[in-house]
Image (cartoon, grey):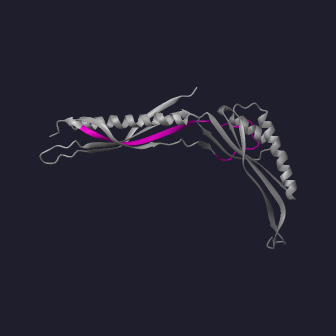
C-alpha cells in the first residue's frame, strides 16, 4: 500500500508595508513556502548488458545475439510482475593491439566486441534482486544501474503544491498579525513542483552472487511557491 508523508517548511519571509505621509497604503507581504510529499517507489529499473568478444565481427554479433536471447527468454518466463524490456543501445566495435615485441608498432585489429544494452522495468520492487540474479545467471555480464521511481508522481506534485501554498499562507498570516493587520488576497503566485529524481543504486555488483540485496526506498516530490499577499485593514503598529 502506498503511503505519503507531507512536510511543509518556509524558507524565506519578506514583509513590505508602504505608509507615505497623509495616507496609509495597503502594502503587501511576500512569502516563499515549500512543501514535500514522500511516496513509495513502485517501479524498479535495471540496466544491464551482454558483452561478447570474438575474432570475427560476425561471430561476435552472433554470440551476442544468442546470449541476449537466453537472458530475455529467462526473464520473460520468470513471471515477474509488470515486466517490460527495451533495448537502449547496441554496439559492435573492433579491438586493436599493437605489433612488435614492445607493443609499439602499428595497431592491428585482433578481434571484435559486441555489446547489447537492455533496460528491464518491473512493478514488483521487492523482486528487483531476483531480476538481477536471473539476468546474471542467464548470460548478462554487465549491470550498469538500478533505479526506482513512483508512478503516482503527478498526484504527489499537486499535494506538494497545496502544502507549499498553505505553508506560505500560514507564515504570511503570522506576519500580518504581528503587524496588527489582516491578511488580504493573494496578488501574485510564482513557483511550481518538479518530478522526483529516480533513486539510483550504482556501484559494483558481484556477478557471481546469488540473492542480490536491493532496497527500493522512497521518492520525494518537492514544490516551492512565492506568494505576494495584500495587507488588509488594521491598526498600524506604533
Q: Magenta segment, which residues? A: 202-231
The residue drawn where x is 53% and y is 36% is 154
Left or right of 58 on screen, residue 36 = left
Q: How many marks?
A: 0
Residue 98, x across and y down, in percent? 81, 69
Which of 150/158 is in front?
Answer: 158
Question: Residue 47 falls in which quadrant of the image?
Answer: top right
Residue 214, x across and y down, in percent? 65, 37
Per the image, is 197 magenta?
Answer: no
Per the image, is 227 magenta?
Answer: yes
Q: Quadrant of the N terminus?
A: top right
The residue drawn where x is 34% and y is 35% is 169
On screen, 58 above or below 141? below
Asked whether residue 137 is in view, the answer is no
Question: Residue 126 falls in which quadrant of the image?
Answer: top right
Which of 78/160 is in front?
Answer: 160
Q: In the displayed image of the protein, which residue is found farthest to the top? A: 1
Residue 65, x across and y down, in percent? 83, 48
On screen, 102 above or below 111? below
The residue drawn where x is 72% and y is 43% is 86
Which of 223/202 is in front?
Answer: 223
Q: Quadrant of the C terminus?
A: top left
Asked whether residue 43 is in view, the answer is yes
The residue drawn where x is 77% and y is 35% is 76
Residue 112, x across and y down, in percent? 82, 59
Left or right of 88 on screen, residue 60 = right
Amino acid at each position: 500500500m502506498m503511503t505519503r508523508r507531507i512536510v511543509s517548511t518556509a524558507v524565506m519571509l519578506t514583509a513590505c508595508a508602504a505608509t507615505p505621509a497623509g495616507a496609509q497604503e495597503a502594502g503587501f507581504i511576500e512569502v516563499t513556502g515549500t512543501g514535500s510529499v514522500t511516496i513509495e517507489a513502485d517501479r524498479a529499473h535495471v540496466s544491464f548488458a551482454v558483452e561478447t568478444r570474438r575474432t570475427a565481427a560476425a561471430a561476435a554479433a552472433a554470440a551476442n545475439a544468442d546470449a541476449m536471447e537466453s537472458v530475455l527468454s529467462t526473464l520473460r518466463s520468470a513471471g515477474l510482475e509488470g515486466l517490460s524490456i527495451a533495448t537502449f543501445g547496441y554496439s559492435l566495435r573492433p579491438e586493436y593491439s599493437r605489433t612488435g615485441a614492445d607493443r609499439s608498432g602499428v595497431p592491428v585489429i585482433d578481434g571484435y566486441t559486441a555489446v547489447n544494452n537492455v533496460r528491464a522495468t518491473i512493478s514488483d520492487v521487492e523482486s528487483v534482486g531476483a531480476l538481477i540474479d536471473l539476468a546474471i545467471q542467464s548470460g548478462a555480464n554487465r549491470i550498469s544501474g538500478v533505479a526506482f521511481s513512483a508512478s503516482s508522481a503527478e498526484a504527489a506534485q499537486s499535494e506538494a503544491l497545496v502544502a507549499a501554498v498553505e505553508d506560505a499562507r500560514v507564515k504570511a498570516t503570522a506576519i500580518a498579525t504581528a503587524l496588527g493587520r489582516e491578511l488580504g488576497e493573494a496578488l501574485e503566485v510564482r513557483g511550481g513542483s518538479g518530478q522526483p529524481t529516480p533513486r539510483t543504486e550504482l556501484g559494483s555488483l558481484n556477478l557471481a552472487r546469488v540473492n542480490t540485496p536491493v532496497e527500493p526506498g522512497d521518492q520525494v516530490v518537492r514544490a516551492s511557491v512565492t506568494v505576494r499577499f495584500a495587507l488588509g485593514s488594521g491598526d498600524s503598529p506604533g
